[in-house]
């Protein structure tokens, strides 16, 4: 127990006391009361062996307690302030004339309870209580920060999953387009094989020669073969042209610089820029199937599927992947223009008429033309009565408001 002895005295007259242990604290306390100098309010402490006697004097009332040396000064003086307020609130002005130990029987129980409270309860110390509250606030803040961080991690994971889903969507689109083009070329090759089979059995069916020739002609048209590639030691060269309708044949009349327009082969394995006349070339291209894309600001071009034949050097077959249309010449034209900005609507007179201001003006015009006709159809007697009522009510007429209207004729 931190606080072991307490007394309340008026000057040196002891009014109430309580001791938690059997010591000579009562004798030492009376000696201290006799030695306290002056009559001013003060807080003072005296040391005796391993105990400290703390005294609080307020308005001639002395509150003394004996506590352990380890208790310090904050808790004992908080205890003395509490005892002083309780004693004055309980007895009031009776303290000024009370005899020795008059309040001991009743107030000693209060001293015992408060001594136990300030000695054992950690909430008795205001600083400890504030530290505990600060610790709780700190714990709550840490939990909130952890929740916010966890929520941020969840948001980041959601963003990552969304990005992965978008990438997978793009990849699936490319793969599906590639698969579609592959199946198209397989159909074309199958038609070529069918044509070869037809030519092989041609001697056996001389009577059906016109029909077979017609089939051969249709197969040749469907293949749409073009010879725009020249062979070299390490590969082939693909030549083509980008053409935009409405521009001159000389020079590349795009609204951007010519070096901003580029042609991409196989997703970026080879990139070339256009010449001033719009032509482009890819060198050292191996035999096989390739994809050509045109990147021009302001226009959208369909990717072109190009098949360079290894059996027939110089033979190239090309088709647009968007429209599945074969090309006789590798001349690429835009499918449409790209719109990057919202087009402003042109001026429309109906929008002005339908606006609130237009409706108000129209209503005023209608009233202006209809009111005279309504007045003409009214009975003159009713008009005269209405004018008399307006004069009686003090409502000025329009003639009086006009300049010179108030003068008599």
Image (cartoon, rainbow, N blue to C red):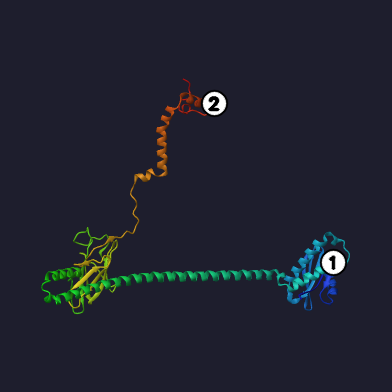
Q: SS class of the residue under badge 1?
A: helix
Residue 299: image location, x then y, percent: 28, 62
CA–CA distance in space, label 2 to label 1: 91 Å
Quarter holding the N terminus is: bottom right
Which of the two residues, 342 or 367, is positioned nearer the viewer here?
367
Q: Is residue 92 at all visible to an observer of this figure?
A: yes
Q: Please rate how many residues cluster around mark 2, counting C-alpha atoms within 10 Å: few if below 14, some from 14 to 19, many from 20.
A: few
Of the numbered discs in the image, which one, if any, rests on residue 106? 1
Q: Is residue 287 above or below residue 244?
A: below
Q: SS class of the residue under badge 2?
A: helix
Which of the two residues, 129 or 372, is positioned nearer the viewer here?
372
Quadrant assignment, res 327 = bottom left
Q: Outermost residue toward the right?
A: 99
Q: State which tag comes first along the sequence, 2 or 1.
A: 1
Of the numbered discs in the image, which one, if any, rests on residue 392? 2
Residue 43: image location, x then y, percent: 76, 68
Q: Is residue 13 at all visible to an observer of this figure?
A: no
The residue that appears at 52% across and 27% down in the rendered structure is 390
Of the numbered discs in the image, which one, if any, rests on residue 312? none
Quadrant assignment, res 20 = bottom right
Q: Is residue 292 left or right of residue 25?
A: left
The residue that appears at 42% across and 69% down in the rendered structure is 162
């Amino acid at each position: 127990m931190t606080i072991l002895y307490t007394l309340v005295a008026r000057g040196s007259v002891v009014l109430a006391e309580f001791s938690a242990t059997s010591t000579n604290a009562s004798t030492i306390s009376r000696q201290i009361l006799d030695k306290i100098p002056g009559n001013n309010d003060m807080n003072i402490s005296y040391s005796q062996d391993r105990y400290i006697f703390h005294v609080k004097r307020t308005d001639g009332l002395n509150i003394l307690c004996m506590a352990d040396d380890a208790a310090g000064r904050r808790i004992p003086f908080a205890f003395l302030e509490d005892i002083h307020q309780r004693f004055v609130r309980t007895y009031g002005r009776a303290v000024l004339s009370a005899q020795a130990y008059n309040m001991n029987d009743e107030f000693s129980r209060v001293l015992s309870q408060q001594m136990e409270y300030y000695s054992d309860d950690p909430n008795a110390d205001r600083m400890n209580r504030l530290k505990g509250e600060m610790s709780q606030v700190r714990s709550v803040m840490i939990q909130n920060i952890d929740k916010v961080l966890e929520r941020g991690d969840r948001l980041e994971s959601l963003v990552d999953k969304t990005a992965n889903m978008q990438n997978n969507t793009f990849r699936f689109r490319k793969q599906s387009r590639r698969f579609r083009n592959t199946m198209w070329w397989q159909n074309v090759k199958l038609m070529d094989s069918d044509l070869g089979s037809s030519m092989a059995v041609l001697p056996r069916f001389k009577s059906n020669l016109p029909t077979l020739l017609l089939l051969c002609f249709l197969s040749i048209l469907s293949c749409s073969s073009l010879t725009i590639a020249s062979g070299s030691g390490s590969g082939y060269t693909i030549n083509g042209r980008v053409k935009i309708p409405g521009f001159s044949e000389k020079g590349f009349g795009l609204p951007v610089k010519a070096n901003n327009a580029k042609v991409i082969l196989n997703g970026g394995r080879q990139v070339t820029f256009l010449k001033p006349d719009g032509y482009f070339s890819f060198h050292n291209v191996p035999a096989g199937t390739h994809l050509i894309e045109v990147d021009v600001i302001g226009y959208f071009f369909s990717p072109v599927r190009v098949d360079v034949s290894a059996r027939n050097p110089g033979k190239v077959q090309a088709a647009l992947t968007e429209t599945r249309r074969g090309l006789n010449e590798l001349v690429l034209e835009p499918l449409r223009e790209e719109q990057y900005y919202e087009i402003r609507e042109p001026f429309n007179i109906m929008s002005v008429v339908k606006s609130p201001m237009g409706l108000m003006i129209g209503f005023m015009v209608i009233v202006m033309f209809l009111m005279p006709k309504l007045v003409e159809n009214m009975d003159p007697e009713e008009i005269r009565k209405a004018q008399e009522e307006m004069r009686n009510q003090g409502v000025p007429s329009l003639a009086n408001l006009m300049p010179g209207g108030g003068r008599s004729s």
